[in-house]
Image (cartoon, rainbow, N blue to C red):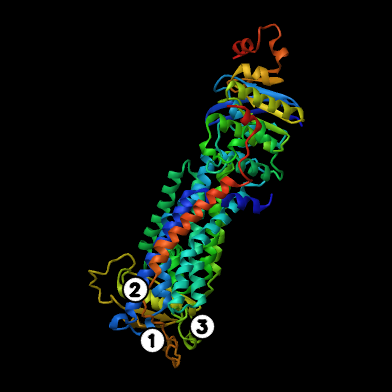
Amino acid sequence: MRLRELVRKEIAELAASRAFWLLLLIVGLLTGQSFITAMNAYAEASGIGGGPAALAQGLSPLDGILTPTLGAYDLAITLLFPFVAIRLIASEKSSDALKLMLQWPASIERQIAAKAISLIGAWIASLVPFFIALALWRGYGGHLHAAEVLNLLAGYTLRFLLTAAIAVAAAALMSGAANAAIVVLAFTIGTWALDFIAAGRGGIVQTLASFTPTATLRGFERGLFRVDVVLVMLILAIFGFALAANWLHLGRSIKARMAGTAVLLILASLGVINVLMLVRTSFDVSENRRNSFSAADENLLARLPEALNITPFLSSEDPRMADFENNVLVKLRRSVPELRVVYPLAGRSGLFENDAHYGEIVYRLGMKTATSRSTTEEIVLDTIYELASMRAPVRAPSTYPGYPLAKRAGGAGWVFYGLWPAMVIGTWRATRHVKRSAGGPPAVSPRARRQP
Amino acid sequence: MNLTVTHLSARRGTRTVLTDVSFTAYPAQILGVIGPNGAGKTTLFECVAGVLPFDSGKVDNDLLFYVPDAIRPWPDQTVRWTLELTARMFDTRLDETLLDDLDLVALQHATVRSLSKGEAKRLDIAIGLASPRTVLLLDEPFDGLDLRQTRQVMNVLRRDAAKGRTLVLSIHQLSDAARACDRFLLLDHGKSVAEGTLDELTAGTGGLEEVFLALT
């Protein structure tokens, strides 16, 4: 059976679901609120109304407009989309439509693929308010860097895909929609907890935490496209959808479905482990190259003769640690071929540290060791070059001009709070009308006419 | 095409729900599966259709279609959408006479959710008939229908069987079963206790009810 027919059916089911239209309505309102707030903050930072303007180079649309506006979608993906995805499975399970579907010539795997495609369609439809926000931003004279926009959208799409897969799997495994929703929310809260616990800990916990939805988004929001993150998210999403298909085979015994789950789990684990071990490629697509050292520095670091070991004696909650992690280690991981970071104070608050070494960062390259307390990029690089007996390159100043825009989001309120709800409600009513009148005007059966 | 089920057994946890059930249904005939509540009629249908696992036995026909009892599939969609979907999924077109035969023309634009019990039952039967599969299993096709509708549905099913389809119906009303079916399979406690035509089963007894009471 053609996949197109199945996708058509799933789209009709989405369009018939009030949850989907409600989601579109709320996403528009949330996006509008985020965009207008971001625009106002950006305008103030740009010196609107005669206030002091921030340094132009510090004003990036990626941080100031795109990320906060898409933040609305983070909320929607966490709290709204799971219900739309769960409904696609749970309603067919509870109405016994699934028993009919299992007898169709199309395999359940193909039917789940159709559901995944239709959910991606729903995601794209929900992005319309974001595209409206982009158009308004451009209309106000704002600047956009295409690679940053596409990268950010890719990140959010992967985040959505993973959540949808988890929701679909939960709906297939659990007995009702409410139970499935609890499982999805528990997963989300679990990843938040992991993200919080793993910060600055290093080791396997931090590696795992770097693949939580929140952590992966952080990379995309910085303009970083990590191939390993993309592959792991895709593997996990495919695992979720495959798990759903496995558990919807009602004609298979529980034992067979458990065995199927084990096989899928092994395959997904092997895939993830391979990606973690083999893939390190990443692309800095940010316009201001915030995830990279200068080209001269990257060339030098790539030629370090031995493995570089770094031991920061900083607790995970120390702001200097966060600064070092986000502004230095992120770049070093992309540039140094062999980098090992040990976190000796992981899990400690740092509030009551009496150790004289606290705050030190120890660098070791071969037999040579150096200690510094600085988390500043230039000083860290100079320390490493000194250890490697290399001469620091001449660093050209950043050419990123920054894009201040001292304008309020005039008219955006009307678009998001007036036009968008009217469009959603109007389209919803139109689809209902089309559905009822499909196939021509209602005919009257000769028998129905005969009977009173 | 025949539907032959041999030595089918199924367990749910520690409970045996079907034990060594065998039967054959023939083309252009209606086989009625009768038995008291809890006899295993629905379980038998679901195992045969492959939507429930079974432990042992064989079903030699996978070109069958089973419609469960009292379902309201895709409740937010219309009756016509549901029937067209079923036909489309089997790469065929919806036979419009089906709507007329089952008094669904006036309901074709109503949502499945809004149907009454009897209307939903007629839709369920139409879903089964919209499939081109050569063997059709319907669970309680007359449940929820009034006398006129029951007779009307019986006629539709008989006409469909006459075209060569093999029909297997689960029926708890013996009077309906006696009127609609050519042959019978009597189930009790998950076991097949009798199989045959009405004459074969009632030989030497009063009727189907007497056979039912004697064997179950």
Residue B191 can be seen in this image: yes
* Residue identifier under label 1: A378
The reply to whether dot 2 and dot 3 touch (C-beta < 8 Å) is no
* Residue identifier under label 2: A40
Cα distance in 3D space between marks 2 and 1: 34 Å
Three-letter amino acid code at disc 3?
Ala
* Residue identifier under label 3: A302
* Tag 2 subunit: A
Q: Position of residue A193 (x, y in %)?
A: 37, 58
Q: Which mark lies nearer to you, 3 or 1?
A: 1
The residue tagged with tag 3: helix, strand or loop?
A: helix
Q: What residue is rendered at 63% in x and 39% in y?
A: A443
Q: Where is residue A70 in the image (x, y as percent from the top left)?
A: 43, 66
Report the disc number at residue A104.
none
* Tag 1 subunit: A
Q: What residue is rendered at 59% in x and 28% in y?
A: B42
Q: Where is residue B164 in the image (x, y as percent from the top left)?
A: 77, 30
* Res. A350 image quadrant: bottom left
Front residue of B102 and B172: B102
The residue tagged with tag 2: helix, strand or loop?
A: helix
Whether labels 2 and 3 belong to a single chain: the reply is: yes
